[in-house]
Image (cartoon, helix red, strand yellow):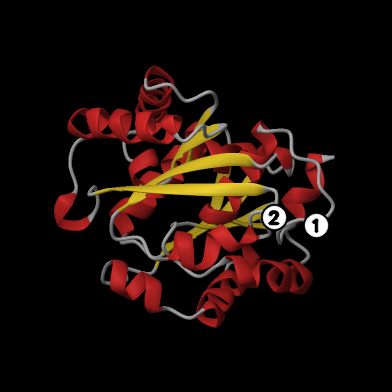
Amino acid sequence: MASRVGLIIPSSNRMVEEEMVGFFPSDVVAHVTRLRMTGGNRKALDELLPEVEAACAALADAKCDVIIFHCTANSMSEGVGGEERLLAALKRAGAPKAATTSSAITQALRALGAKSVALVTPYDTKVTDKEAHFLEDQGFTVPFSKGWTLAGSDAYCATPPDVWRECMLEATPAHADAMFLSCANVQGIKIIDDVEATTGTPMITSNQAVIFEALRQIRWRGEKRPPGRVFQTLG
């Protein structure tokens, strides 16, 4: 019987179904629901939490085994305390197991044994700095951090994977233990194997880390694994 993963994503996201869902193993089914929470629809966490609970309850109705709030910037924007409030909201709403993008990223980096992280984002400096501070608060050093200040969701989606590959290679001289391409709305999973082979450094993306965390929480142990060294840690 298939396991089920529920994903709560921004309404503007186009990469979760287009890129990410296809990398789940064949015996894991992803169910997706959307909230208007980015760009002109951005709201404070206090306003967002009731909507998160309602979306989570709907996914719980579909018998999802794990439910994940999947938006990198929103899950990191109010620091570790904000992430804890999101996790609590998911659990209140009936998630059997719960995660956020930021908790998934943290778990993936720890699974890799990383102490330092090179951070690349499509965001502006302010949002990128918040993500760097979040990672530092979780105990990682961030020797390289660069936001490319792209003009919103359309630009995030339209940027080809090869461009992100070059951005990741630019981070290589930082000699970090791992590299992280942030944002659930970019085309990043397909470049992971190439970047890891070229640099010798493990790479994670927001979408890949969420797949990893979902599989970790449901204790998946199949043979055919998604791209990235982090999946070797599942045992």
The answer to which of 66 and 159 lies nearer the viewer is 66
> In terms of secondary structure, where does tag 1 sit?
loop
> In terms of secondary structure, where does tag 2 sit?
loop
Classify the position of the C terminus by image quarter. top right
Task: Name the residue tied to disc 2.
Answer: 26
Q: Amino acid at mark 1?
A: Lys
For the residues bearing labels 1 and 2, Cβ distance under 8 angstroms? yes
Give the side of residue 182 with respect to residue 234, left or right. left
Give the side of residue 102 with respect to residue 228, left or right. left
Whether residue 183 is situated above or below residue 232 in the rendered picture: below
The answer to which of 150 and 95 lies nearer the viewer is 95
Q: Amino acid at mark 2?
A: Ser
- Regarding residue 115, the answer to whether it shows in the image is no
- Identify the residue at horizontal 42%, vertical 78% (top origin): 159
Percent of width and height locating residue 46: 20, 28
In the image, farthest residue toward the left: 40
Give the side of residue 93 with respect to residue 212, left or right. left
Task: Name the residue tied to disc 1.
Answer: 224
Percent of width and height locating residue 201: 73, 60
Whether residue 121 is situated above or below residue 37 in the rendered picture: below
| Gap between marks 1 and 2 measured at Cα | 9 Å
Give the side of residue 218 with respect to residue 233, left or right. left
The answer to which of 133 and 102 lies nearer the viewer is 102
Classify the position of the N terminus by image quarter. top right
Q: So how many labels did they put on this image?
A: 2
- Regarding residue 225, the answer to whether it shows in the image is yes
Which quadrant holds residue 40?
Answer: bottom left
- Identify the residue at horizontal 62%, vertical 73% (top origin): 169
